[in-house]
Amino acid sequence: MEWPIYLDYAATTPMDPRVAAVLGQYLGQNGFFGNASSSTHVLGRAAARAVESAREHVAALLDADPREIVWTSGATEANNLALFGVMRACARKGRHLVTSQTEHKAVLDVCRRLEREGCAVTYLAPEPDGLIPPERVAAALRPDTVLASLMHVNNETGVVQDLAAIGAITRSRGILLHVDAAQSAGKLPLDLQTLPVDLLSLSAHKLYGPKGIGALYIRQRPNRVRLEPLLYGGGQERGLRAGTLPTHQIAAMGEAFRIAGENMVVEQARIRELRDRLWQGLAGLGEVELNGHPERNVAGILNVSFVGIAAEALLAAMPEIAVATGSACTSAGGEPSHVLRAMGRDPFQARGAVRFSLGRFTTVEEIDHAIAAVRAAVNRLRELSPLWELRRRGLDQRAVNWAAP
Ligand SMILES: *Cc1c(COP(=O)(O)O)cnc(C)c1O
C-alpha cells in the first residue's frame, strides 16, 4: 500500500507517540492492569490513581472540576448520555429540546429517537456561512424547553458557534445547554468557569488519543445537572456510567489532553498557516467555493467545492491524498452532506464538497504536495468535460449540474 498524505484529521487522528507510551503501561502483567474498583490491593489502587490523574488533566483543559468529568466510550456516547439523560430526568418539567440542522449525527439521531418517545425537537437552520444566530435560539425557546444542544465546532466546515452569546440566553431562561465539543477541545480555549455551558461532550481520538474513549462534562456548581444514566451495573462514575473503567484508554486520554493544553496556541497558529497556504493554493484554480465562515473557523478544517467536479471523482483521481467528502460518517452513505444542504448549498454543490483537515503531524511539504495533486486532478477533470468548456467560454453559466451523481 502506498502511504497517502493524511488530511483527514477531523475524522480521526493518529495517536501521539507520547500517548501510546502511556497506554502501554496499563495493560500487561508488569503494568498497572488492575481494576480501578479493586481497592483491596495495590494494583487496583494504582489503577484508580491513574484514572483520577487523567480526570484532572481533562478537567484542567476545560477549567472544570475533576468531579464534573464522567468517562464514556467517546463523544457519541457522551451525546447520548447528555440528551437522553437530561430529557428523561427533566420529563416532568418539560419535553422540548432545541438543536440545529448542522449537528453531528450522534446528536441528530438521538433527537429523532427522542421524538419517537414523545419529545418535541426544534431543528434550527444556520445562516449560509454556517452560524446559528443567537437570536434564533432565543426565538425557539418555549415554556416547556429544558435543553438546547449545539455543537462548538462543526466537524464538516470548521465553523465556530458563539457559545458565550447562546449560553447567556439559555442560562437567563433557566434552560440547560449541551455542547458537542469533539472538534474544539484542545484546539480552542474552553473555560467552563466563565462559559455558561452545562454539559459538554469530548472524544480522545480527535485529539491524538485512542479511539473508544471520551467523556461528558456535567456541571456541578452552582447547580448540579441531574441525569438518568444509560447503563446500569457496578455503580462506577457515581452511578452515571456503569462498567469497568478502561484504565489504559483513560490514562491515554488524560495524557493526550495534557499535551494539548501545553502548546495549543502555538500549534493552532502553525496549523492555521498551513491551512491558509492550502486555501491560497487551491483558490488559484478559479471557481473554488469555500463552504464555511471566512473568519469564525477552527484552524485545521478547510471545506471547499470545486465547481463542476463531483468530490468522488476528484478523490478517485488523487488516491495519494487521504481526504473526505463531507464527513466520514455521511460519505459512507453516499448522500449529499446534511450540513451543507442546511447551509443552502444545492445538491450538486454539496456533492462537490471536499473536506481537508490538518493536524499536529501535517508538514508544509505535505501541503505543497497536496496542492499540486489537487490542481492537476481538477484541471484534468475539467479538461475532460465538454460542458466545462462551454462554461469557460461563457456559453452556459449554469453548466454546473452535469457534475451530478
Ligand atoms: C467525531 C465526532 C463525534 C463522535 O465521536 P466518537 O468519539 O467517535 O464517538 C461526535 N461529534 C463530533 C462533532 C465529532 O466530530
Image: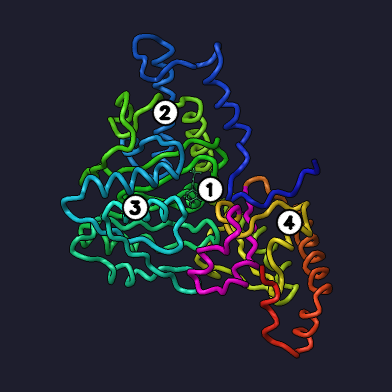
Identified at 41% across, 10% down, the residue is 42
Identified at 77% across, 84% down, the residue is 392
Q: Quadrant of residue 3?
A: top right
Q: Which residue is mark 4?
A: 367
**Amino acid at circle 2:** Ser
Query: Could you give the CA–CA distance between mark 3 and mark 1, rounded to whole angstroms?
Result: 24 Å
Report the mark closest to the observer, 1 or 4.
4
**Amino acid at circle 4:** Ile
- Mark 1 or mark 4, earlier in chain: 1
Q: Which residue is mark 2?
A: 53
x, y percent for residue 75: 45, 44
**Amino acid at circle 1:** Met
215 vs 308, left or right, is left
Report the mark closest to the observer, 3 or 2.
3
Name the outermost residue toward the left. Answer: 92
- Mark 3 or mark 1, earlier in chain: 3
